Image: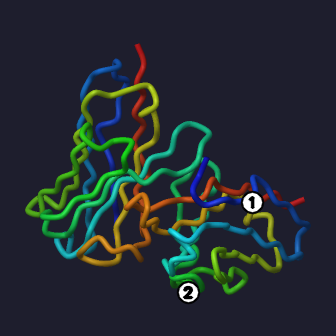
Amino acid sequence: EVQLLESGGALIQPGGSLRLSCAASGFTFSGYAMSWVRQAPGKGLEWVSVISGSGSTTYYADSVKGRFTISRDNSKNTLYLQMNSLRADDTAVYYCAKAPYSRPNPGNWFDPWGQGTLVTVSS
Amino acid sequence: QSVLTQPPSVSGAPGQRVTISCSGSSSNIGAGYDVHWYQQLPGTAPKLLIYDNSNRPSGVPDRFSGSKSGTSASLAISGLQAEDEADYYCQSYDSSLNGWVFGGGTKLTVL
């Protein structure tokens, strides 16, 4: 069974940094692209970033470009999201999700999703 | 404002059929990019319901169906059940934004 388990969420002050992790199991991790999707409290879903199975290709939403960095350690079956210069509007539950292909593809869907980890940016 | 437009809410009685629309543009659905649908039950993570416009993953009841035409897509739920009460999101890709996009979500209420 494919399982994704996020961790690292916390209350952080504006301008601060945080690293989220997503531990994967139940599939050949390096064979699939992985993504982060976030959901602000009471709001809809927003795609954040995607990384290829090899880690060589990454894409970001404009809202986080230059501030967030996605990475992965295939030896540890773990996906990361380094978040810098955090702002109040980054407050959200962050989900990691598996893509169906090894490379990011416009036709990508996300399945399955982890349970999410809450990031709160507030002073 | 989401790139993909969904009605904020829909409702139906048990046993009825409801549809949820997802309206896009020439840079996403109209460009030929596939549409996918997710169900988010209260307090849980989203779950894939339909992929590639009309395909159901294993385990999803055939009461759920999807379609796409032009710049829009639709999710239909027949034989409504109380357990279907949830938020539903469409998702596609947008070539102008160079990224994956979601609809704003539709809350389904089973009366």
* Residue B39 in picture, x, y percent from top left: 61, 64
Q: Which mark is residue A116?
A: none
The residue under label 1 is which amino acid type? Glu
Q: Residues within 10 Å of mark 1 (few under 14, many from 20)?
A: some
Q: What is the residue that sits farthest to the top in this orientation?
A: A123
- B13 is higher (above) or lower (below) than A47: below
The residue lying toward the viewer, choosing from B18 and A46, is: A46
Position of A98 relative to A67 (above/below):
below
What whole-number distance in Å separates the C-alpha atoms at marks 2 and 1?
21 Å
| Sequence-earlier tag: 2 or 1 | 2
Q: Position of residue A56 (x, y in %)?
A: 12, 64
Give the residue drawn at x 64%, y 81%.
B70
Q: Which residue is mark 2?
A: B55
- Chain letter of disc 2 in the image: B
Q: In the rendered view, does A36 fall on the left or right side of B109?
A: left
Instruction: Name the subunit of mark 1.
Output: B
Query: Which residue is located at x 57 percent, y 76 percent?
Result: B30
Residue at 33% from the left image edge and 59% from the top image edge: A35
Q: Residue furthest left?
A: A75
Three-letter amino acid code at the position of disc 2: Asn
Name the residue at 63% across, 53% down: B104
Contact, mark 2 vs mark 1 (Cβ under 8 Å): no
Q: Secondary structure at mark 1?
A: loop
Q: From this view, report whether residue B111 is shown above or below residue A68.
A: below
Compared across the picture, whether B110 is left or right of A35 comes to right
Where does the image place residue B17, in percent across and percent down from the top left?
A: 85, 77
Residue B40 percent coordinates (x, y): 60, 58
Q: Which mark is residue B85?
A: 1
Residue A30 falls in which quadrant of the image?
A: bottom left
